[in-house]
Image (cartoon, grey):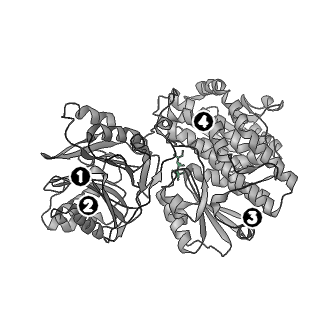
């Protein structure tokens, strides 16, 4: 959601902080601010709007203002986007400045208490309460003041703090909101997401929950728990470089990421597909085969697009491995009292590995004694670190807010998991080989679909003015219908509903008229004929149909107004192909409507608050 950047070293902080903020803008972007400290004191600039607005208001400032600073992009939770609510926030004496990701849940009680003590507040934010607390406790030892303040607060935080009279130190701490420290050559960087600092160093420390770090000049750092017990953090190397954060000639990150999918699917398969044995290996699960064989139930927990991938996973695993699977929204799971038996395996699925609800669900399942495994993209993320084992997607950084390549990589990993479990329990060597060979062919089949980009764009041109869309699919392609509808609504602000095609007649059919196009996944599988009947039902009510169908299907053009053909694969893998035209369709409709595709309104890439 919000983004944090910090720098302390020998270089000028300002350009590094601004560049870092731009890299983080995809996480949240309704306001931005910066605080720099030097021997002359503390300087703060902030305003409503994007990082470009911050650049504008800082154009005339002295850029050599110092070699230490903190900066923030905000995604509003408490208080509307405005200059006064933007971070950094200060205490009332303006001795300290603080940026914060997360939510201070008891801010209202603390605010009343501080007001009674005569402290004046300027903003409506929960963050200002934390800044005022640090200011209240500050007596020339910034880390001590931060520790005391954090002892008073409930909620989640990733914070960076500087003090006016200490141009030699940044203090950062976290609980529930990610922070990563970049260890450079006599310099230290801080960010809520490694993409903000990878241009400067690939050596990082992932700050753990309830840890505090003091960053000093000359690259010296000191890490403790919030209770001031010293710890030695582990150093990690980032797996990607700055180039992967560029658009690479594409107009938007989303389009680049759609086109990366042949490669990202290959990356997810690499070293894991054992064609000759007709099975898969997923070493990161850290589970012995004996234990995998005794699983009686699987629970997938996720949000958004990752939840849609989980739903496909449910269909696959029940079908091929015969293990009962449940799919839960993380936000529901965490507050229910879920029943987790002794042979239940919980998988949390998250691209970012930082989604607050998914992380909380993971912890709830762990408390109940479950083995919890992760399927994550972001290496070293909180979810990746807190799970007992798991599988990385290796899709590289996904910058577009609308998830695309992560979805197909999640499906790839779930297919591998299905193959592994299926071979242990139910399916023969030859059936395993059929799945393995079909998986191997997927990247080149995706490439073929991407060649139809222009055709999808033409269809988008016909329909981009429409205000409502229905997405219909059955079986493996029902979750794809949900995903197609989500893609369209989040980036084009067009109302779209995904439905199991046969459920349409239980309600949504009332919506159909000539103004409401239906996108129907009409894949040649065992229920193809039923889907054709559903298309007839739409047509009979004047609705036009855009069908996604298999190459060689001569029947479909009689029924649908437009057809986008995709190569044939086995039914369980069809979502990996059928979702591609839907991603392109959403992209082109949003582009034609003039929407901000990579940074849609109200959304953030990584939802680190409840
Ligand atoms: O990082 P995660 O996979 O945990 O994120 C979950 C959702 O927030 C995410 O998939 C969201 O729905 C995307 N914007 C969808 O495109």
Residue 271 visible, this orientation: yes
Foreground label between 1 and 4: 4
Write down the residue under mark 3.
323
Write down the residue under mark 4.
260
Q: Of callouts 3 and 1, which one flags the residue occurring earlier in the amino acid sequence?
A: 1
Q: Label 1: state its secondary structure.
A: strand
What residue is shown at x 77% (from left), y 40% (from top)?
523
Query: Marks 1 and 4: CB-CB under 8 Å?
Result: no
Does the numbered disc 2 mark a residue whose Cβ is under 8 Å from ligand 1?
Answer: no
Q: Give the quadrant of residue 423.
A: bottom right
Write down the residue under mark 1.
89
Q: Nearer the viewer, residue 70 or 361?
A: 70
Write down the residue under mark 2.
130
- Tell me how far mark 4 sits from mark 3, CA to CA: 33 Å
What residue is shown at x 62% (from left), y 55% (from top)?
391
How crowded pointer 1 is (Cα within 10 Å; few <14, some 14-19, many 20+) is rated as many
- The x, y position of residue 45, in whole percent, is 22, 41
Q: Of callouts 4 and 3, which one flags the residue occurring earlier in the amino acid sequence?
A: 4
Q: Of callouts 1 and 4, which one flags the residue occurring earlier in the amino acid sequence?
A: 1
Foreground label between 4 and 3: 4
Query: Marks 1 and 2: CB-CB under 8 Å?
Result: yes
How crowded pointer 4 is (Cα within 10 Å; few <14, some 14-19, many 20+) is rated as some
Q: Is residue 567 found left or right of 26 in the rendered image? A: right
- Tell me how far mark 3 sits from mark 2, CA to CA: 48 Å
What is the number of callouts on the image?
A: 4
Residue 540 visible, this orientation: no
């Amino acid at each position: 959601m919000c983004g944090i950047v910090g720098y302390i070293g020998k270089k000028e902080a300002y350009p590094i902080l601004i560049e870092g903020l731009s890299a983080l803008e995809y996480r949240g972007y309704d306001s931005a601010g910066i605080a720099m400290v030097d021997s002359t004191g503390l300087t703060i600039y902030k305003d409503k709007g994007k990082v470009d607005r911050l650049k504008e208001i800082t154009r005339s400032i002295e850029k050599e203002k110092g070699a230490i600073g903190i900066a923030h992009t905000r995604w509003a939770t408490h208080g509307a986007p405005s200059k006064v609510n933007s971070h950094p926030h200060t205490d009332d004496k303006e001795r300290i400045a603080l940026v914060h990701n997360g939510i201070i849940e008891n801010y209202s009680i603390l605010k009343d208490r501080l007001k009674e003590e005569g402290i004046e507040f300027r903003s409506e934010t929960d963050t200002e309460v934390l800044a005022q607390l640090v200011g209240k406790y500050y007596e020339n030892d910034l880390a001590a003041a931060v520790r005391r303040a954090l002892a008073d607060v409930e909620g989640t935080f990733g914070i960076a703090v500087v003090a006016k009279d200490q141009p030699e130190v940044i203090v950062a701490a976290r609980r529930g909101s990610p922070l990563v420290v970049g260890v450079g050559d006599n310099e230290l960087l801080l960010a809520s997401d490694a993409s903000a600092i990878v241009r400067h160093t690939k050596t990082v420390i992932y700050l753990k929950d309830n840890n505090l770090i003091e960053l000093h000049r000359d690259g010296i750092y000191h890490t403790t728990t919030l209770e001031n017990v010293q710890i030695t953090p582990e150093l990690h190397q980032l797996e990607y470089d700055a180039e992967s954060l560029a658009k690479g000639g594409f107009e938007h990150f989303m389009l680049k990421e759609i086109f990366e999918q042949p490669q990202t699917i290959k990356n997810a398969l690499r070293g894991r597909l054992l064609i000759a044995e007709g099975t898969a290996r997923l070493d990161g699960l850290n589970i012995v085969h004996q234990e995998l064989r005794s699983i009686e139930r699987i629970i997938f927990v996720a949000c958004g697009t990752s939840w849609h991938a989980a739903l496909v996973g449910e269909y696959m695993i029940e079908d091929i491995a015969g293990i009962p699977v449940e799919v839960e929204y993380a936000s529901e799971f965490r507050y229910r009292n879920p029943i987790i038996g002794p042979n239940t395996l919980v998988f949390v699925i998250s691209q970012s590995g930082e989604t607050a609800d998914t992380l909380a669900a993971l912890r709830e399942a762990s408390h109940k004694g479950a083995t919890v495994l992760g399927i994550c993209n972001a290496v070293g993320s909180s979810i990746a670190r807190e799970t007992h084992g798991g599988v990385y997607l290796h899709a590289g950084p996904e910058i577009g807010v609308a998830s695309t390549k992560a979805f197909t990589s999640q499906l790839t990993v779930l297919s591998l998991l299905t193959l592994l479990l299926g071979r242990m329990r139910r399916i023969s060597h030859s059936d395993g080989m059929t799945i393995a060979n079909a998986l191997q062919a997927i990247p080149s089949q995706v490439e073929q679909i991407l060649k139809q980009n222009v055709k999808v764009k033409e269809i988008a041109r016909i329909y981009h003015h429409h205000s409502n869309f229905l997405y219909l699919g059955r079986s493996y392609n029902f979750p794809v219908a949900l995903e197609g509808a989500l893609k369209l609504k989040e980036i084009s602000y067009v109302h779209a509903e995904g439905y199991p095609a046969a459920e349409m007649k239980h309600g949504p059919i009332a919506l159909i008229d000539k103004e409401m196009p239906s996108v129907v996944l009409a894949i040649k599988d065992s229920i193809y004929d039923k889907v054709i009947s559903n298309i007839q039902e739409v047509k009979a009510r004047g609705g036009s149909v855009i069908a996604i169908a298999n190459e060689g299907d001569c029947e479909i053009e009689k029924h649908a107004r437009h057809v986008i053909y995709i190569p044939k694969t086995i039914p369980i893998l069809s979502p990996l192909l059928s979702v591609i035209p839907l991603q392109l369709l959403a992209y082109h409709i949003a582009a034609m409507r003039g929407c901000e595709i990579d940074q849609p309104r109200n959304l953030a890439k990584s939802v680190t608050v409840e």
